[in-house]
Amino acid sequence: MSNQAQALNALFKPSQGPQILSVDSADNTVLITLHVPDQLSWFDGHFPEQKVLPGVVQVDWAGKLARALFVKNDAFQQLSNIKFKTMVMPDTAMQLELSFNAAKHSIKFTFFNETDSFSTGSFKFIPS
């Protein structure tokens, strides 16, 4: 695991975050390969019959990672174009693509894997 992946894993408590396996970047886009552990505290009670990762947790993960990689201490301004397409189940392997638009100071996120698109959205920040 790279130093960058280790640093990003450290943003989360073990029972609350994804396992970040690798980080690849090119220009203003970062592709993070991650695993959703089945023992996350978020799975408890969201849907009693079926463990599902709440959408708000996906947004939180994307926001924490986007801030760490692109905007550091800039103030959050807006969350837009949020779409939850497919439920994220325990023990899911997926990727998170973060694309930074410097002119708009916005970051688009997409969680996906080979078979599914899980969620998408966009953050806007105010430059500090």
Image: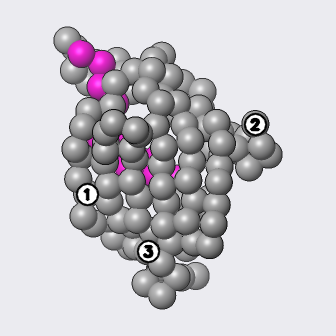
Q: In front: mark 1 or mark 2?
A: 2
Badge 1 or badge 3: first in the primary sequence? 1
Disc 1 designates what residue?
82
Residue 73 is a magenta residue: no
Q: Disc 1, disc 3: CB below 8 Å?
A: no
- The amino acid marked with disc number 2 is Met
Count neighbours of disc 1 (C-alpha within 10 A) and say few if under 14, some if 14 to 19, many if 20 or more.
some
Q: Main secondary structure of the magenta part?
A: helix
Secondary structure state at the residue bearing disc 2: loop
Using the numbered discs, state the Cα–Cα distance from disc 1 to disc 3 in whole angstroms. 14 Å
Quadrant the N terminus occupies: top right
Disc 2 designates what residue?
1
Disc 3 designates what residue?
106
Q: Disc 1, disc 2: CB below 8 Å?
A: no
Q: Is residue 73 above or below residue 126?
A: above
Q: Which residues are magenta?
A: 50-64
Badge 2 or badge 3: first in the primary sequence? 2
Q: Is any part of residue 52 visible from this angle?
A: yes
- The amino acid marked with disc number 1 is Ile
Residue 58 is a magenta residue: yes
- The amino acid marked with disc number 3 is Ser
